[in-house]
Image (cartoon, rainbow, N blue to C red):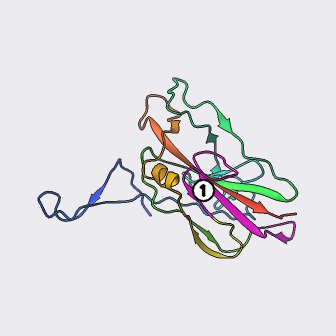
Amino acid sequence: MGRSTFEGPVLAGDNRFGPQRDVGVMGLFQQAFLDFSVTQPNTANYGGASGTFVSANNIPNNAATIWTPQAGAYSTNGPTVATAPTADTSGTIYRGVSFLIPQGSNIYSIDIDVGTLPTGGGVTATAIQPYVSNQFATSAGVYATFGSITAVGRTACTFTGTQLDNSFGTLQDVQNIQPGQQPTWFSQVVVTLKLLQLH
């Protein structure tokens, strides 16, 4: 299948001008599929490893660099400070995905689909606690909140008032690793999955 890329925003509708316009803005959709039995990096559905998250902006999945948000401080060297996810312990492991999206995006929804509860050492995880933030997080996220996921199926996020405000215009987090190239800034969205009671 062919692919094409372009800069937005993209409008859809028949009547662009006039008092009765029917034009809407199209949305960007990103996803990642993690198979925790796939341990080889740069392999389709690679699920990450201890201290390693996955980048959703590459095909196939590969190891992600999670940048510490720069808070708008531009550097001629590009982003320079990276954050490593917490390493696995006997009862808890962290896996997740890092997305780069256009700065100032509007996040409408984040869904987590669980087809099979992850396993490790023959023991199935009893719960998955997701956190959605602009960096690696192990508590309430900047962008969205999930309850503890304990069964297969689709779970949608919820938003607090502050998270809604953040999601209506995502933050200026990470500059382009090639200074001078467009776009200058990205928003970083990191989905952290805390998997409990894997032994």
Q: Is residue 89 above or below residue 155?
A: above
Residue in the image at 36% along x and 49% along y = 6
- Categorize mark 1 by other alpha carbons within 10 Å: few (<14), some (14-19), many (20+): some
Residue found at the far left of this picture: 18
Q: In x, y percent, where is residue 162?
A: 51, 51
Residue in the image at 70% along x and 52% along y = 41
* Quadrant in which the C terminus is drawn: bottom right
Q: Is residue 40 something one can see in this rendering? A: no
Q: Amino acid at mark 1?
A: Pro
User: Would you say residue 135 sits in the magenta stretch?
Assistant: yes
Residue in the image at 16% along x and 63% along y = 15
Which of 164 and 106 lies nearest the eye of the viewer?
A: 164
Write the start and end of the magenta stretch as one range: 119-146
Which of 117 and 63 lies nearest the eye of the viewer?
A: 117
Q: In x, y percent, where is residue 67?
A: 61, 39
Residue 23 is left or right of residue 38, and the answer is: left
Residue found at the far front of this picture: 161
Which quarter of the figure has residue 122? bottom right
Q: In x, y percent, where is residue 164?
A: 48, 55
Q: Is residue 31 something one can see in this rendering? A: yes
